[in-house]
Image (cartoon, rainbow, N blue to C red):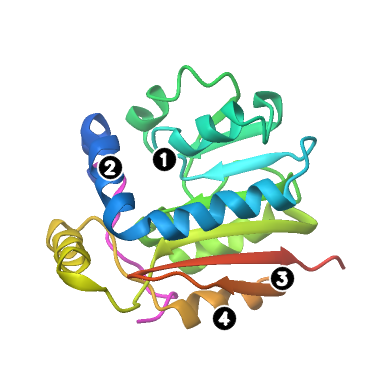
Amino acid sequence: MTLAATYPDLAGFYERLAPGYDRLHRRWLRHAGGEAQAALEAAVRVFASPHAGLLDAGCGTGAFARRLISEEVIPPANLTLLDPSDAMLRRCVDILCEKARGRLEAMPFEDGAFDVVTCAWALETSARPAKAIEEMQRVLRPGGLLCLAFCADQPAIGIVQKAIRQSLNLRGAGRFLPLGVVRAAIETTGAAKVVSVPVTGPVAMLVAERDRS
C-alpha cells in the first residue's frame, strides 16, 4: 500500500453513521484501540501547555475534546474542532470552541496556526492520507506537535480483535495503514523527530515534532 494513492471518499459514510457512531467507537476502543487512544491522550497531557492552540482534526462527535476540557488539559478557547461531516459537528454543539467543516486533505487554516494537532481514527478514512499528513504538518507551527492514532497494518491479537478488523474491512469504514509508510510520510513533510509509542493490536500511535526551521 502506498499513501500516495487515492482511496474511496468516506465522508458520506460517516455522515450517515453519526447517530450511532459513539456506540461503535466505544466498542472499537474497548477491544482494539483503547491502548493507542490512552497513549494519545497521555501525550497531549504531557506536552500541551494550557495556553497551546490545539486542533482536533477529524474530531467526530467530540468525545476526545470533551475529555480534554473536562480534565482542564486545554480550555475551550484554545481548541478548534475540524470534521468533514455536518452531522458529526452537530453532535459537538455543546463544546463551546471554534469549529470548522473541512477535510483533512484541505484544511481551512493558515500555515503554522496551531501548537498541537491531534488526529485520532481519522487518517485511515481519508481519501488521500499522504495529503492529509502534509496538511497536518502545514498547520503546525515550527516546533509544534502532531499526535496521531490510527488503524495500522499490525497484528490483531485474539479472536475479538481479528473479528473487529474483519468487520471494519467488510463495512468499508477505513483501511489499515502501514505504520512504516505513515512514519516515513511524516518525516518527509517537515518532522524533526517521530516517535512510535508501543501499543498492541491493529493500531498505531505516533508523536511527531515539526522541524523548527
* Mark 4 lies on residue: 184
Q: Residue at x 59, y 57 (%)?
A: 147
Whichever of callouts 3 and 4 sits on the residue coming sooner in the sequence is: 4
Q: Is residue 75 above or below residue 14?
A: above
* Mark 1 lies on residue: 84
Whichever of callouts 2 and 4 sits on the residue coming sooner in the sequence is: 2
* Mark 3 lies on residue: 190
Whichever of callouts 4 and 1 sits on the residue coming sooner in the sequence is: 1
Circles 3, 4 touching at the beta carbon (< 8 Å): no
- The type of residue carrying mark 3 is Gly
Using the image, tell me which numbered label, if any, was put on residue 14: 2
SS at badge 4: helix
Visible in this render: residue 209?
Answer: yes
Report the Cα–Cα distance between label 1 and label 3: 25 Å
Q: Residue at x 34, y 70 (%)?
A: 201
Label 1 CA crowd tier, 10 Å (few <14, some 14–19, many 20+): many
- The type of residue carrying mark 1 is Pro
Report the Cα–Cα distance between label 2 and label 4: 28 Å
Residue 172 location in percent, x, y? Answer: 19, 59
Circles 2, 1 touching at the beta carbon (< 8 Å): yes
Q: Quadrant of the N terminus?
A: bottom left
Q: Is residue 184 above or below residue 66?
A: below
Q: Which residues are magenta?
A: 1-12
Q: Residue furthest right?
A: 213
In the image, taking residue 108 as reference, residue 104 lies left or right, namely left
- The type of residue carrying mark 2 is Tyr
